[in-house]
Amino acid sequence: MVYAADTLRDTLFTNWALVSEMLPEGSPDPTMQETVRFFAYPQQSGQEHPKSVEVVKINAELDEIVEEHPTYKIVSDVYEIWVRYRVTDIQVVQRDLAEANIEDMCAEVTRIVRTVYKPSAGTSTYLTARYDWRNMDKPDSLQPELIRVLRLTLSQLRSDNATTLRGYLLALTYDDSGTSNADSKPVGGDYAYTEVQDVTFTEGYDPMPYYTAENPTDSTPVFFRGAWRGRFTAVLLAKEEDVDNSTIENINAMHLMQTEGEQAEIAFFHSTSSTSPGTLTVTNTAIIDKVTQISNTEELVKLRIEGQLTKPSTWAVT
């Protein structure tokens, strides 16, 4: 996997944004007697720093937890992030402040970790990221120790062949330069749909069967090439930004008639990557003829767009 304990420790330290009593070590604030220190290993018992964040990697480096399937495997790395805050004054006001401070520290750890490892984040390569917090406080000592532990499990879907493409990293983008016949285009050009669940397309030539005059009773026909045709479909979770105005990239507008009575030809490109690393990008150009909203009472709202391809797709591996 990509990240070891020291890298995650450095990520937490570099992106730490708390101030006041939770400033990170090395901060230029001489009034602070204790700052938050960061470690990539367990601290020695009884000598823990009063305010600290320590990252412990549970499985050995390059020895991931593996779940084998017939054609793929799920590999996982597990970390524990220990957040510590020592209460030096057990007065009610100070204890309340300590509880608030460690909750802020936990929230900051969660924010930073999700920025890097959240599956939908642009920098992430993970299928799932699981965050499990537990309370390990030691309230009975003279100076109570507030300890909260995040167990972080990061999982990837892999093939034994590094060039196999991963569908869960799918990205779909409206291609402004390839779109034509649109009355109103977005000001910012290309537009990325961030909640894509599925993209499918099918294309090809229709075979045309016929029977020869020489053997009209033969049940096996001869085939000639017919017309080319294709269909494009995408399913995504509904976001306000995807339907909030009338420019052509908006799902509520892309199937509508334009000023001259025609429909727009809209270009999309979608990409998936492998671990080699390599990226397959396919560009489809379609006239969208159906937009469907799928609203179930126990699911997030989905939108499905469907259309007729107007030209053969282009494929590129980079």
Image (tube, helix red, strand yellow):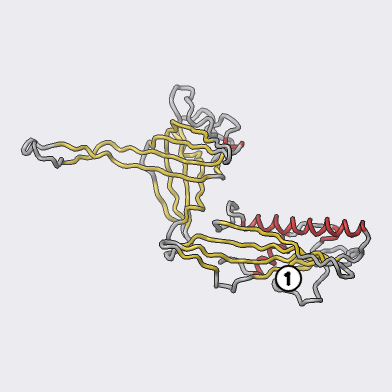
Residue lying at the far right of the rendered structure: 91
- Relative to 190, does residue 167 appear above or below in the rendering? below
Q: Which residue reaches farthest front?
A: 140
Provide residue 202's location: percent of width, then percent of height: 36, 42
Place of residue 85 in the rendered image (x, y in percent of width and height, measured from the top left): 82, 65
Report the residue that reaches farthest toward the left: 214
Q: Quadrant of the N terminus?
A: bottom right
- SS at circle 1: strand
Inspect this view and state whether residue 35 appears: no
- Above or below residue 220? Residue 35 is below
Would residue 308 be found to the left or right of residue 80 on screen? Answer: left
- Residue nearer the viewer, 161 or 285: 161
Q: Is residue 109 above or below residue 262?
A: below
- Sort mark 1 into few (<14), some (14-19) or many (20+) by Cα contacts within 10 Å: many
312 relative to 20 in the view: left or right:
left
Kindly identify the residue that appears in the image at 58 percent across and 37 percent down.
Answer: 297
Q: Nearer the viewer, residue 316 or 83?
A: 83
Percent position (x, y) of residue 174?
Answer: 51, 40
Left or right: residue 166 versus residue 93 is left
Residue occupied by mark 1 = 39
Q: How many marks?
A: 1
- Image quadrant occupied by the C terminus: bottom left
